[in-house]
Amino acid sequence: MTEDPVAAEPSHPTPVPATVPLLSQDFTGPTVTALRHRLAAAVAGAGLVGDAGYDFVLAVHELVTNAVRHGGGAGHLDLRRQDDVLICEVSDHGAAPGSLPVRLPAVDVAGGRGLWLAHQMADGLILASGLHGMTASVTVCLSPADGPEGVTAAPAHADPAEDDER
């Protein structure tokens, strides 16, 4: 029996996405503001600036305040960059109800907009309930450009009126 020379060659490994930790911090109610400032600096340092950076920080802030209010008063934040994606996970030790609504409540209802805002302000939102509490993750894609480390937010179209093809 002859060996197939192609099958005998070592296969080329699939590249593993480069993961870079950017921020990892425990938080409580009194430390939320300081955490937001550190998060904003880390997000800007990763190249996500302007409105896109502000929106991502706001999305994470909503998850952090939810963890404080509904997750036992404390939590942990992990921000990392994986290739061209920024990922932020917010974990707490709270027990989640059967399902969490990610929808805009009625205008006469106070509160209840945190998850909806996080979903609107980020490219993706994942909620996971486990034995030790909840983890909410938000993501945003970075685009190649001339920013720090070669990435920055995709530029927003400056004038929506220019899209009008009349």
Image: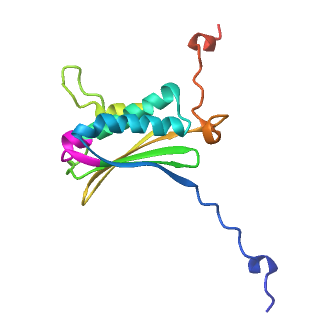
Q: Residue at x 81, y 89 (%)?
A: 2
Where residue 155 appears, as percent x and y from the top left, is 60, 26
> In percent of the image, x 64 and y 60: which residue is there?
15
- Name the spot of residue 29 as percent of width and height, x first: 22, 39
Q: Specify the quadrant that holds the C terminus.
A: top right
Q: Is residue 43 above or below residue 3?
A: above
Quadrant position of residue 9: bottom right
Residue projecting furthest to the top: 166
Quarter of the view holding residue 122: top left
- The number of numbered discs placed on residues in the rendered structure image is 0
What residue appears at the point 64 percent right and 63 percent down from the top-left corner? 14
Question: Nearest the camera: 8 or 122?
Answer: 122
Residue 102 visible in rendering = no
Percent across and percent down for residue 139 are: 46, 42
Q: Nearer the viewer, residue 18 or 121?
A: 18
Residue 68, magenta (yes or no): yes
Which of these two is toward me, 35 or 106? 35
Single out the residue that lies furthest toward the bottom: 1
| Left or right of 78 on screen, residue 6 | right
Q: Residue at x 38, y 31 (%)?
A: 58
Q: Height in image: 81 above or below 65?
A: below
Colour approach in the figure:
rainbow
**Which image quadrant is residue 133 in?**
bottom left
Q: Picture coordinates of residue 43 (x, y %)?
A: 48, 38
Would you say residue 29 is visible in this rendering?
yes
In this rendering, position of residue 22 left or right of residue 152: left
Give the residues in magenta. 67-75
Placement of 136 over or under 7, stated as above or below: above
